[in-house]
Amino acid sequence: MPASRDARPQPRSPLVVEGAVKHFGGVTAVDGVGLEVASREVVGVIGPNGSGKSTLFNLIAGMLALDEGRVWLDGREVTGLPAWRIARAGLARTFQIPSLFDNISVRDNLLAAAVEGDWKGAPGRAGEVLEMLEIGHVADNLASELSGGQQKLLEFGRVCMRDPSVILLDEATAGVHPKIRRIMLEAIRRVREAGATFLVIEHDMEMVRETCDRIVVMDAGRVVVEGSFDEIADNREVRRAYLGRRE
């Protein structure tokens, strides 16, 4: 008699998605997506607008409910858990438009992210994050007073304050000044070296090339190809997804 699916060995990778499906009415936004991200790996998710990337992130983070499929975080199944429980289990994310507390200071934004963690060590940790992200000079400014790029840095800083095992980044370098981009890429490298695992949505192909170990290409809700940057750069399926070519 075959074993039930619950009797299978639990995944060892920090993030595993199996057969993720999400429908919106008659539209299938995510169609059977499966992926696995190894410890300290940085995996990029690319694809044209409407390919299902952000919906996939929302499913992993618990902001949307899966219609089918399962998600594991650090070997624990988190399918169906609310977003706050998945966050407490070790997942953190950023958004295309930063989600901050606009009317409190930059420093207090960082401290607020640490309320459920090491509160006694939070001030010192906030100082380290301010230095890493080169925003110490605006620590006492309101978050609403920051530039768009600085707000992206602050949101990433809030993620760092939680010390998550898995981080989802949604276009973290989109539209930012080259200096902000450099700071962000260096911060990602440092956080990765400290043990974090990343899944990244990004349209900046140079950032993907510099940062990602592996790339997953989505189109029409499905994974069409995955591999290294060089492997996907000249792939016919990738050209078709982005340019509409049928070769």
Image (cartoon, rainbow, N blue to C red):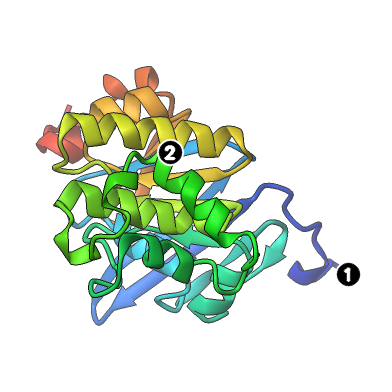
Q: Is residue 230 visible in the rendered structure shown here?
A: yes
Q: Are marks 1 and 2 in contact (CB under 8 Å)?
A: no
Q: Which mark is residue 1?
A: 1
Measuring from the top left, give residue 156's x and y in whole percent. 38, 52
- Nearest the camera: 35 or 4? 35
Quadrant of the rendering where the N terminus is positioned: bottom right
If you read the primary sequence from the N terminus, does the residue marked by circle 1 or circle 2 appear first?
1
Among the 4 quarters of the image, the one containing residue 69: bottom right
Among the 4 quarters of the image, the one containing residue 226:
top left
Q: Nearer the viewer, mark 1 or mark 2?
A: 2
Q: Secondary structure at mark 1?
A: loop
Find residue 152 and report its horizontal and vertical position in percent: 27, 51
Residue nearer the viewer, 146 or 177 = 146
Would you place residue 126 above or below residue 1 in this image? Answer: above
Q: Residue at x 29, y 67 (%)?
A: 99
The residue positioned 44% from the left and 37% from the top of the image is: 188
* Amino acid on which disc 2 is placed: Met
Q: Position of residue 36 (x, y in %)?
A: 57, 46
**Callout 1 amino acid:** Met
Q: Is residue 229 left or right of residue 123?
A: left
- Asked if residue 165 lies left or right of residue 217, the reply is right
- Cα separation, mark 1 vs mark 2, equals 55 Å
Provide residue 64's location: percent of width, then percent of height: 40, 76
Q: Is residue 41 above or below residue 77?
A: above
Badge number at residue 47: none
Quadrant of the rendering where the C terminus is positioned: top left
Which residue is at a point 24% across and 36% down the rendered structure image? 180
Which residue is rendered at x = 38% and y = 60% of the image? Answer: 107
Position of residue 178 in the picture relative to residue 221 (left or right): left
Classify 207 as above or below 129. Answer: above
Q: Which residue is labeled 2 in the image?
A: 132
